[in-house]
Amino acid sequence: MNQREITNLIIKHVGGAENINDLYHCMTRLRFNLIDKGKFNTAELKKIPGVINTVQSGDECQVIIGAEVDKFYNDLQAMGIGKNSGGESSKTPFRVSNILKAVLNTIVGIMAPILPIIIAGGMVKVILAVLVIMGMSNDTQNYKILSLISDAPFYFLPFYIANSAAKKFKTNSYMAMVIAGVMLHPNFLKLVADGDKISLFQLPVHSVKYGASVIPIILTVWFMSYVEKVVERFTPKMIKTMLRPMLLLIITAPVALIVIGPIGAYMGDGIYYVIKNINENIPWAVPTLMGIFAPVLVMVGMHLSITPFAVLSVSQLGYETLMGPGMLGSNVAQGGAALAIAVKEKKLEKREVAVSAAITALSGITEPALYGVTLKYKRTLACVMISGGIAGFYAGITGVVRYAIASAGFLSLPVFIGENPQNIINAVITATIALVLSFVLTFIFVKVEKEEQTDLTDNNNKTTETLKNVARGSVIPLKEVKDEAFASGTLGSGVAVLPADGTVYSPVEGQISMIYPTGHAIGITTKSGRDVLIHIGIDTVKLEGRGFKTYVEKGAMVRPGDRLVDVDLNLVKESGYDTSIIVLVLNTTDNDILVTGKGELSVNDELLQIND
């Protein structure tokens, strides 16, 4: 199954393109705002190859993909998804809780797309810190230029937020960036630096430095979105092209400098005051709580809502304690738990999943560990939360701070390097506590079920499920299929059949779990719970259903030999497509599958065996 096919399945199971009101993404997940959230089919989405999990949080419906999320996002954007204006999402009752959810979802929606920029700046600061340790002087031009590069993502943050906020508030992104330009203009900064009173037509303009600020530009763009609606409504059509942008600028910019910007700055100062007092009076509280509850925040995708305040803390204080210390403990704890499961797990496939998840968690990305390990093994989440909390408590009482924003893990430990040499030492101890404690607790208290511990080399403990042939024809090895996604075994192990006629039959007893609209792909869930994919031809999705006729519907029960699809093989060949029928058992390796069919086969012949 190629990327476009997977993308189309995601669209289908979120309710279709017409149901998508807005779309954006963060580091690991697609985030949908749907008109009808009831159409978000979590059960079917989880069956799609490449989808790790799904989450519904407030008005957001999230599809967790992993590191390659941007490829699917670009694919969706190329198809026009997220630009729908055919409807509005249902309105929720006026409650304080609903307002709070809306505010948090808005912040997440704005910050998620620009998170890579913030991480890029943070990681360059990591490199710079390492170079200083290796002997680079901060008086050299090399240091100064690298420092400039690392600071740019933060200083010019209002520009990036303006663009992201404009998309969220559905207003002109270029005009939003112009307003950010006004707030960061060197001449305005000079007026502020001179210390003289500033006014515009006798109205006071407050002396505020907007570099690295977050709240003022978000409020300003939100205001501009309403100005644009008013201007759009009352501007004469004949001169709208010239008058509309001028009115947007001449109205929004002064209001931003005189009213909204200072209000946003005061709000930021208030948050800064709260953060400062927490750091001074109960420094252990926030890292401890973050260490405990970070997995829960990640599950609902709300950890990003804290990012603006962490950035604000870095810009005001030069460091932050809201996320970094606690997230370091939590993320590394996820990795420690996954390593413990890898040691305890006897089944090769699940051990490989645990090892891979551990590596990504220790590097700062926890979704694979969270959904692939932590939530699948009982008591593991509790072990992670306890370990993360204790590690966070240590970070708090020793005053660990983070000097730049980056995914918290072993790779980003240099962001804890600062004027106090003890800070990085305590950060390393924090990570070590989390790793060791989580590993030990998970190893002692988490049980791996006996059926999960079955050694694949122990034939006495194996149970076998047999698949019959799907079409009359000759068997070819999966690795010879002319499609890398199938041939590599990434989606699962199996075999292919070069058909002699165009009738495709069910190979196994089970339930139809998926029928692709074009008829070229069918999924069957077997009685044992295995997911079997039958993919007819290579790239035949491009035929858009021409030459395919299906005989079953989703949810139907089938038995071996039941007719599933008729395909016009001549049409497929004349259209230039390969007719090979791929039969995959999803999420399996070659160790799980034994291909028993050889050479020419009839429909009733055995094709392969699944070994549990």
Image (cartoon, rainbow, N blue to C red):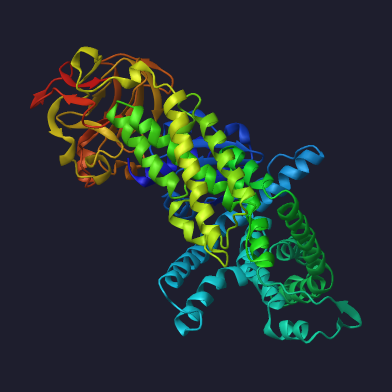
Residue displayed at 67% across by 39% down? 58
How many discs appear?
0
Residue plotted at (61% across, 43% down) = 393
Q: Position of residue 495 (x, y in %)?
A: 19, 31
436 with respect to 165 (left or right): left
Is residue 407 in sight in this rendering?
no
Report whether 160 appears left or right of 182.
Answer: left
Q: Quadrant of the C terminus?
A: top left
Q: Residue at x 56, y 57 (%)?
A: 113
Image coordinates for residue 155, horizontal then vertical, percent = 62, 72
Of the pair 109 and 277, the residue shown nearer to us: 277
Residue 318 sits above or below residue 582 on the image: below
Image spot of residue 115 (x, y percent) = 55, 58
Residue 175 appears at what percent x and percent y? 67, 71
Outermost right residue: 202
- Against 579, residue 158 (above or below) is below
154 above or below 405? below
For residue 314, what is the image quadrant?
A: bottom right
Residue 253 lies in what quarter of the image? Answer: bottom right
Q: Quadrant of the N terminus?
A: top left
Residue 537 in the figure: left or right of residue 255: left
Residue shown at 53%/45% (left/top)? 329
Viewer can see residue 601:
yes
Taking depth in this image into account, of 579 and 417 the one nearest to the observer is 417
